[in-house]
Image: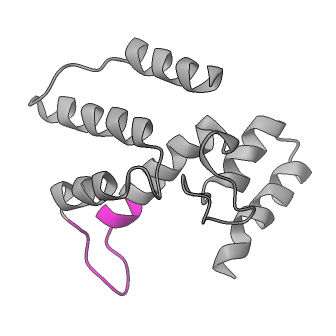
Amino acid sequence: MIKLHPEMGDSIGAELGLSDEQRAIIRYHHERWDGRGYPSGLAQQEVPVLARIVAVADAFDSMTSKRADRGAMEEEVAIQELLDNAGTQFDPEVVKVFVAMRSDRRGDQEHVDGKTVRRQIECFQCQ
């Protein structure tokens, strides 16, 4: 059932009249950079950039949130997990920007503002 939720969500999105771009985010946010994800086994640039961004944010949220069967992971450990999986599970450029933004929030790395993020997204979409 867990692997069906992207397709089910896409169907619900269609019924609600969401755009193709919005539905692609829902459908492909569990695809992996190396092509071993689901539901379609897409790889790298085949995965829409917004789905790649949501994949990183979703994984970070999942790791740092308390669940019924486990506690929340420390943010630093979750960041390291993202870095360890950049280039296999996650788009390495998306991870790089995400980590920079998280670091900026803590004030210990270069500043990444909204304009920089928008430029990065536009750059991803050009690829």
Identify whether 58 is placed above or below 107: below
**Is residue 29 toward the left or the right of residue 19 in the image?**
left
Residue closer to the observer: 92 or 76 = 92
In this rendering, position of residue 84 left or right of residue 10? left
Residue 67 within the magenta-colored segment of the rendering: yes
Q: Residue at x 74, y 45 (%)?
A: 24
* 12, 88: nearer the viewer: 88
Provide residue 4's location: percent of width, then percent of height: 73, 73
On whether residue 89 falls in the magenta region, the answer is no
- Name the one closer to the observer, 102 or 89: 89
- In the displayed orientation, state which residue is furthest to the bottom: 69
Residue 80, percent across and down? 22, 56
Determine whether, in the image, residue 38 is placed left or right of residue 52: right
Residue at 69% x, 43% y is 46
Q: How is the image coloured?
A: one colour
Task: Tell me which corner region of the image, top left, top right, bottom left or bottom right, holds residue 127.
Answer: top right
Magenta residues, dominant SS class: loop
The quarter of the image holding the N terminus is bottom right
The quadrant holding residue 37 is: bottom right
Q: Which residues are magenta?
A: 61-73
Residue at image location 51% in from the left, 41% down from the top: 53
Q: Is residue 107 left or right of residue 102?
A: left
